[in-house]
Amino acid sequence: MDLYDELAWRGMVYDTTEGLREVIARERLTTYIGFDPTAASLHVGSLLPVMALARLQRCGHAPIALVGGGTGLIGDPSGKATERTLLNAEQVEHNVRGIRAQLERFLDFDHPTHAARLVNNHEWLGALGALEFMRDVGKYFTVNYMLAKESVKRRVESDDGISYTEFSYLLLQSYDFLVLHDRFGCSMQMGGSDQWGNITAGLDLIRKLRGVRAHGMVMPLVTTAAGTKFGKSEAGAVWLDGALTTPYEFYQFWFNVDDRDAVRYLKFFTFMDAATIAALEAEHARAPEKRDAQRELAREVTRLVHGADAVQQAEAAAEKLFRGDLSAMPVADLLQIFANVPSCDLPSADAGWTIPELLTTAGVASSRSEAVRLIKGGGISLNGNRVTDEKERVTSAQALEGSVFVIRKGKKDNFLLRVIKG
């Protein structure tokens, strides 16, 4: 497959400008995708565009990751029902540094012929005067044209409306495309399907001011098979920064994806070839309970983001947790694995505690009667051991290293209790 066919096979082509397949086949393109610097880390929702840039570079095209240090001070209305919280310049600069470090795992910024670039649009937008902007950019867009864009139209028709700040975002992004075209010969922009209006506006500006044709491609917005937004776990957003989402949690996020999503995500988020994915798809169809597709998905994406050692550690931890062998794990490792699970302090008590007391303290149950019902139903384990007697008492001596209790409700819900010694 050529690049376009591979992107299409992977399900990454939602819409393109006319003739893009032929252009990609005959030209080496410089292509950019914008990343919103609202946090110092990307999350898994950003992985599809990151993988798109990485695939382009592997096929000899030059990628540009544009971090919106300027537009991040404004906010993109696309896909948003309300105004974004505006960031200050220091916050944006901090976030840009974090994003750069994560992109370096996927993109080669030192390639001799088609090195990746990371640019911050604050460099030119921060120096752009209001009169210059209105004269050199604003005059090429009618208000009717802007109101026709879906991202703007939806907000105009909402109860809250849209501020002039976010209304102007489309013009700023168009200007970004023009600047990248002039400085680096960038002739293609990619993004999510909600960016189509912004991308085509940039194409129009380049055509009007430079008399040349640029190109655009948008990818589908990733959802789960259940129709929910991709990239959320019980702990919230799944980040690429291991300090925000531990490698163990990251691995488990991918391992636990729905059977209906596993093969699709293998195509989206790994570099596995068609034959390898086809073999996994066949095995997945034959024995979905083995979760081979999810296991390979979790291994590969965790390796790409956190490295091979993180995969080994995540799988070793999962094996110990599955066996209930928590006593063999240092508490420091447990605290890292369960960094984002519900937790609370447990004041020391000489007489110890009943299991229902632990469950209500941890928030596992709202009352003693509910706690007893969960215990009798066989759904509670303490430090890896199934609890069967609601009258049993435990003491701090039974806590892991004398300091931590791990309560599991069902198969997945974990809770931590930290013993506070008086």
Image (cartoon, rainbow, N blue to C red):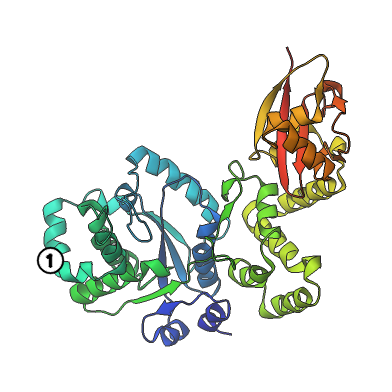
What's the residue at 38%, 44% (across, down)? 92
The percent coordinates of residue 383 (x first, y second) are 83, 36
What's the residue at 23%, 62% (across, down)? 171
The percent coordinates of residue 66 (x first, y second) are 39, 58
The percent coordinates of residue 367 (x first, y second) are 69, 33
> Local crowd at mark 1 within 10 Å, few (<14), some, or many (≥20)?
few
The answer, for residue 104, to whether it is visible in the render is no
Name the residue that disc number 1 marks: 139
The answer, for residue 180, to whether it is visible in the render is yes
Q: Amino acid at mark 1?
A: Lys
Q: Quadrant of the C terminus?
A: top right
Relative to the observer, which residue lies in front, 111 or 64? 64
- Tell whether 255 sits left or right of 69: right
What's the residue at 56%, 60% (across, down)? 106
- Which of the 4 image quadrants contains residue 374? top right
Relative to the observer, which residue lies in front, 342 or 372? 372
Q: Quadrant of the N terminus?
A: bottom right
Q: Is 180 situated above or below 93?
A: below
Relative to the observer, which residue lies in front, 7 or 57? 7
- Tell whether 253 sits left or right of 145: right
The percent coordinates of residue 124 (x first, y second) are 26, 53
Q: Is 156 situated above or below 401?
A: below
Query: What kind of element bears circle 1?
Result: helix
Q: Residue furthest top?
A: 422
What's the residue at 36%, 85% (across, down)? 18
